[in-house]
Amino acid sequence: MNPEALATAILAVLTPIADERRPGEPLEITAADIVLERPRNRDHGDWATNIAMRVAKSLGTNPRELAQQIADGLTAVEGIASVEVAGPGFINVRLDAAAAGALAKVIVDAGEAYGQNSSQEGRSINIEFVSANPTGPLHIGHTRWAALGDAIARLLAASGATVAREFYINDAGAQMDRFAASVVAAAKGEPTPEGGYAGTYIADIAAHVLAERPDLLELSDEEQHSVALELAYAYQLAEQKQSLSKFNVDFDVWFSERILHAKKADGGPSLVDEAVDRLRVQGHVFDHEGAVWVRTTDFGDDKDRVIRRSNGEYTYFAADAAYYLNKGDRGFEHKIYLLGADHHGYVHRLKALAGAAGDDPEKDIEVLIGQLVSVGGARLSKRAGNIIEMDDLRNWLGTDALRYSLERSPADSPLSLDPELLQKRTNDNPVFYVQYAHARTHNVGRNASDSGVDRSEFAPELLTHETEAALLGALQEFPRIVAFAAEVREPHRVARYLEELAGLYHRWYDNCRVIPKGDDPIETVHRTRLWLNDATGQVLRNGLDLLGVSAPERM
């Protein structure tokens, strides 16, 4: 008896009651509309719902009276031990031990699929994150978005959505020219040009370029610039991809900004050219003083935006427009942008752009802003000089500790990490605490096998200890936690859930034996508890995987 089954049972009881009170008027709710919550005080039962209070007025009855009618009907449902009405109309449901315990086998049989749900089914979502300039190494800010963006994508996919992780490569514009000029200067042994990129990593890239093209310095200035740009760009982008892959983050699409500005093979207009025309058709483009504008104030922006200057040059907003339209052309109905703390101004701009394109700014586009992160004692990159590199952080703290700690706090909260804590192998370290619980489930399984305890029997009615009821209750919550975390784009809800589950498992471990004492015989309860042990391990493993964190079997 899981929450979905219980909600269905409640609806089945409520429907004839509603029909009797309002003949011919169907009850316009579904099982998904029936909210079930775990009571804080477990003495009040396993589940509580306020459905009677929500619909009583529309049925012309008293909430508590309706709650009692529903309660009376639920007592006949198999798997429900008792139902009580509390307060103004809350319904508290207690499941019998067999119905609650049956979940352990459900989880083990489902394996990696347990927790997956259909709450986002039918949605095609493009989630863009990191999107760093290919002019230097990834830094601590990119690291936070890499962890969060990937975890959100995993949650959405687990909830049934079709998801594409996308990295927008800012490989057009003045920063690329400054990058190339910096590499050429390093190759010549000259100082960094004004406004250029410094750091020993530029010298490393220059050495790579010279190895690829020993004749670089024999070329004309224009050719030097062009050759250095392409080779340095490819080298730096490959390094970024490698850094992300080592951090368990892989993208489905690497989208080059150059594509937006390139003319078609037949000489036709670029995607940016077409974007201006498409927005004009929507009726939100106007000309003023020789420039082309988009009336974004119609959609809440603080001012209208220039998309093409009077000299004919396109603005960054033009590329943003072309990119947004291109995502829709590729079949993505919903677009999620993950931006850093210094990009607050982009929120209204991008939403206004969606509106000008004929989309719903409140439905078709979502812009998430992340706050800054700091790590006590972290050193600036020796190569870049002025940043804390992703690779340095990963090598120092480890992928698991770094990802987990970045994902267990809301993205919109400034975050300060304690490296001393994250390197501890104690229960004070949240990621160690959860991983240790998972490793313990495997240790119990190994010891059980050595002692002759297997899963050849399963009698869920024997799982009656209070720690077993609490553990089963938490395990039952996992699919709903995943669905809700996906809906609100908050991976930290999974992390906090896993920490709670680990605590409940440790308490169960201290109170309930899977292996008999001494020479005591192996009984059905021991075999049944092994199912519960393995179910807990499976949920811990599934949850950690959603966060991109490993689940070690030994620690």
Image (cartoon, rainbow, N blue to C red):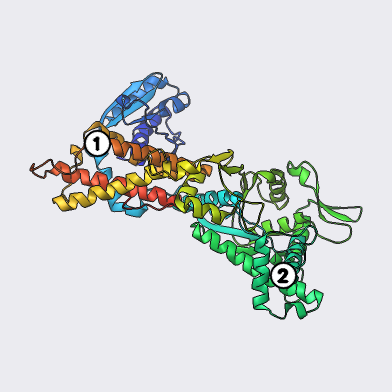
Asked which secondary structure carries label 2, the reply is helix
Amino acid on which disc 1 is placed = Asp
Q: Is residue 216 above or below residue 23?
A: below
Q: Residues within 10 Å of mark 1 (few under 14, many from 20)?
A: few
Q: Residue at x 55, y 54 (%)?
A: 392
Q: Which residue is mark 2?
A: 229
Q: In terms of image quadrants, where is residue 362? A: top right
| Picture residue at 85% right of the left edge, 57% below the top | 309
Q: Are marks 1 and 2 in contact (CB under 8 Å)?
A: no
Compared across the picture, whether 55 is left or right of 551 comes to right
Instruction: Please provide percent x and percent y for residue 202.
Output: 68, 64
As drawn, 16 above or below 128? above
Q: Quadrant of the N terminus?
A: top left
| 548 or 124, nearer to the observer | 548
Is 430 displayed left or right of 362 in the figure? left
Q: Position of residue 355 (x, y in %)?
A: 70, 48
Coordinates of residue 311 in the picture (x, y in percent): 89, 60
* Foreground of the two, 544 or 397: 397
- Marks 1/2: CA–CA distance: 62 Å
Q: Could you say where residue 518 lies in the image, as x and y percent from the top left?
A: 10, 42
Disc 2 marks a residue whose amino acid type is Leu
The one of 283 and 432 positioned closer to us in this rendering: 432
Circle 1 is placed at which residue position? 510
- Name of the residue lying farthest toward the right: 289
